[in-house]
Each structure stands twice: as C-alpha cells, then as structure tokens.
Amino acid sequence: MKTAFPDAERRHILQEAIQQGQAYTLAQEDIAFLASEDLRPVRMQLELLKTEHALREHGVNATIVVFGSARILSPEDARAALALVKEQSDVQPDDPGLQRALALATRRVAQSHWYDEAYSFARKASQCFEHEGPCDLVVMTGGGPGIMEAANRGAFEAGERSVGLNITLPHEQYPNPFITPELAFRFHYFALRKMHFLLRAKALVAFPGGFGTLDELFEVLTLVQTRKMGRIPIVLVDSAFWKRLVNFDFLVEEGMIAPEDLQLFVMVNSAEEAVDALREFYAMTPP
C-alpha cells in the first residue's frame, strides 16, 4: 500500500526536527561532540592555537613569567582578615579552630610583604623592559589572585600590558582584574597552559608558593638543565624561604644534580635585586 505523501505542514515539522538534531549541527558548533573523549587532541590543539594567535596579533613576543602563591594577600587584605579572626577569637578564646585560624591569619600578614615585592618587581620590570632592548619583555602570570594579582597589578599601574593564563579548577579560579583584557586567557589543560608560560619566556621570577609554584619552577629548571630550552634568568625571590624549602646543596652532595646546575638560578631578596638580575643577564645598563 502506498504511503500518503506528507502535506506541507508535516514536511515543515519533519525538516525542522532534522535541522534541530545534533547530527545536523555543524561539527564546529556541536559542543557535546567537541567535549567528547575522541576530540581531546583537537581541544588541546585549540588551546594552543587560540592563545598563540592572540599573542602574535597583539605583538607579545617575549615575556617575564612570574610565579607564586595564590594564597598571599595584599597587606590591606591580610590585616583586615586578621582583625576579623581576632574579633571572633576574642569571643571564643577556647575554640581550637579559631586559634589555628588566628595563627594562619597572623602569618598571612607577615607574608604579605611578598605581595608588595611582586607588585614592585612587575611595576619596575614593565617600566624597564616593555619598550627597552631586544627582549621587549611583557609580564605574564597565571592570572589568579595572590602573587599573580600583585604582578599583573604592578604592570597595570605602570601603564603597561600584562598577560594572564587562568585555568579552570574544581573550586573556580577567577581572573584578577589587572590583566590586559585582550591578553586574559583561560585553559582547561595544565600542560597547554605551562607550554604557553615557556614559549615566549625570556625570564622567570618565582616568589614563594606551594605545589603549583614548585611544579612550574622545577619544570623550567629541568628543561633548561636538559637543554630542551635555552638559558634564561631564573630568579627565586626570598632566599630564606627557598633555602629552607629546598636543600639544593644536598642534591649536589648526593650526586642528584651537578654543581654547575646551581648556576641555573639565582636567589634574591627584593624586587630591585630581581630587576638587577634580569639586567645583568641581558647586559642592560641601568638608567
């Protein structure tokens, strides 16, 4: 028996259903398809190419990468947080949780000078290097709070550009407000983010930090040590922190690294010394 040909209205309904279906969606517009397991290599390539294209477009050819803890507060915020915890602790002096919080808040006030040093370094470095010499260095950070915010803020208040490479985390990390808007990027993959940290890096300045900072720092040291990456100045700020955290001399004594590997980095104690270390490496004359 011959099936009745659908009328115009029915044809329209069928066509609309097809056009709204996932199969008919253009591959580049199919979010579910792009998010699938099979498309991971494509997503990784997109994360590489999108940032690469934008940095080229905006003429960012060389960077000073600044690493450091996201937990470090500005002096103002640290003092405000301490005052709040102290007020709560005065009401409940026997609460062990509040006593721990009070001890940490007190430590955060002491640590806040690192925020000031990161701010000062980025401000000075942006003014010195953004338009000077063959390197034309632009500050680049992970784009989050803490030391990253301080460095982006220093460049911002110097009237210069800076880059932020933010990343999506389980506890969402938001970009700090001092990144140059057209140079604020967000990543899903740590590997691609770290690749962009290093593709244009002409200097690395590491302030005190935790696992993330150590991961990033030691990856750079490994790449330079194994000559997968050319020599760049690697500056560790606050020698007391780094010497207590990592016993580099012990690694030499145990034969885990060579004595000359200690020349891959320098330790300093101030923003001024960090800027001087970069100037010395690139043989720039102070103004």
Image: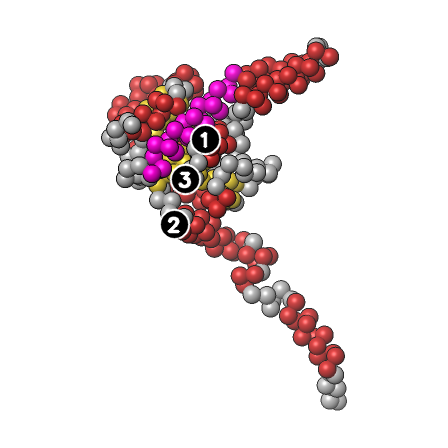
* Pointer 2 or 3: first along the chain: 2
Does the magenta segment cover residue 258?
no
Above or below residue 11? Residue 263 is above
Above or below residue 177? Residue 104 is above
Amino acid type, mark 3? Phe
Q: Which residue is mark 3?
A: 197
Q: Residue at x 51, y 20 (%)?
A: 112
Amino acid type, mark 2? Arg
Amino acid type, mark 1? Gly
Q: Cα distance, mark 2 to mark 3?
A: 14 Å
Q: Which residue is mark 1?
A: 154
Image location (x, y in percent) of residue 63: 37, 38
**Toward which corner of the image does residue 96 lie, by quadrant?**
top right
Q: Which residue is mark 2?
A: 56
Residues drawn in magenta: 110-131
Q: Is residue 255 left or right of residue 87?
A: left
